[in-house]
């Protein structure tokens, strides 16, 4: 059995109640779709990795637990192993190698999506449509802004994925613009 998008959505909603975390999941899903198209990869597979990468955060809210304790749940629900491995590797704390392009893409966009969200929220319009690459780069340098965003991971993610940071930021902004109404941006 392979997990469908509808089943993944149901799984996400079963474990995640926070609207902010749900919006983040959808944002990462959109960014992963954009990178999959750019890589000529399977968009639906990459999208599932983005959608589910933090599904267990509310029930496993420590780095010791997340996403390691969520992986067995994903496997039980029919999530393909390449997606599980990408999710396990989306943070440096697990020690799981990012040995696929999908895994490197997930690591590259996770923290960056959070930063772009934060930049959008301080715009007068609170809309991602008004966010520019230079604004994100400026806020990336300000460690007090969106302090929960790991700046080292943002830079390392672009490097590991093999893309210039400006280009990655532009892709993420464009991807979020495509789903802005769905995620409140």
Image: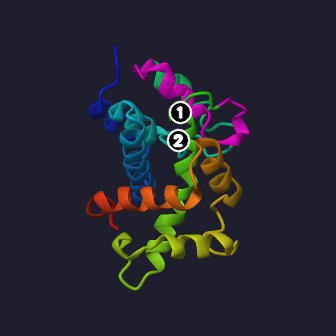
Location of residue 5 in the rendering, given as x and y in whole percent from the top left corner: 30, 33
Task: Please tell me how many numbered marks the rendered image carries.
Answer: 2
Element carrying mark 1: helix
Q: Nearer the viewer, residue 32 or 88?
A: 32
Residue shown at the point (62%, 38%) measured from the top left: 66
In the rendered structure, the answer to whether residue 127 lies left or right of residue 154 reads left
Q: Which residue is mark 1?
A: 101
Magenta stretch: give its range. 76-97
Give the Cα separation between the discs numbered 1 and 2: 6 Å
What residue is rendered at 45% in x and 61% in y? Answer: 170
- Quarter of the picture containing the C terminus is bottom left
Residue 44 visible in image: yes
Q: Quadrant of residue 123?
A: bottom left
Disc 1 crowd, CA 10 A, few/some/many (<14, 14-19, 20+): some
Label 2 neighbourhood size at 10 Å, few (<14), some (14-19), many (20+)? many
- Residue at image mark 2: 105
Residue 24: give x, y in percent of width and height: 44, 54
What secondary structure is found at the residue carrying circle 2?
Answer: helix
Residue shown at 63% from the left, 32% from the top: 98
Q: Is residue 82 magenta?
A: yes
Q: List x then y, in percent, for residue 89.
A: 62, 34
> Which residue is at a point 29% across and 58% down the rendered structure image?
178
Task: Determine the image quadrant of residue 79.
Answer: top left
Instruction: Judge whether 151 appears above or below 130 on screen.
Output: above
Measured from the top left, where is residue 52 in percent x and y? 44, 38
The residue closer to the viewer here, 89 or 129, is 129
Residue 123 versus residue 15 in the image, above or below: below
- Looking at the rendering, in which quadrant would you find the N terminus? top left
Report if residue 128 lies within the magenta region.
Answer: no
Q: Are marks 1 and 2 in contact (CB under 8 Å)?
A: yes
User: In the image as oriented, which residue stretches furthest toward the top?
Assistant: 1
Residue 179 visible somewhere in the drawing: no
């Amino acid at each position: 059995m392979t997990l469908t998008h509808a089943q993944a959505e149901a799984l996400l909603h079963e474990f995640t109640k926070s609207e902010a975390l749900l919006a983040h999941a959808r944002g990462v899903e959109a960014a992963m779709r954009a990178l999959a198209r750019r890589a000529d990869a399977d968009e639906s597979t990459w999208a599932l990795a983005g959608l589910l990468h933090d599904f267990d955060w509310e029930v496993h809210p420590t780095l010791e637990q997340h996403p390691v304790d969520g992986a067995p749940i994903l496997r039980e629900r029919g999530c393909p192993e390449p997606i599980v491995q990408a999710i396990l590797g989306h943070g440096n704390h697990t020690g799981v190698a990012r040995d696929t392009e999908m895994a490197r893409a997930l690591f590259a966009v996770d923290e960056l999506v959070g930063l772009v969200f934060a930049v959008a929220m301080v715009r007068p319009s609170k809309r991602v449509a008004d966010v520019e690459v230079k604004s994100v780069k400026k806020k990336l340098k300000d460690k007090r802004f969106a302090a929960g965003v790991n700046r080292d991971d943002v830079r390392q993610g672009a490097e590991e994925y093999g893309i210039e940071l400006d280009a990655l930021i532009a892709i993420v902004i464009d991807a979020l613009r495509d789903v802005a109404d769905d995620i409140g941006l």
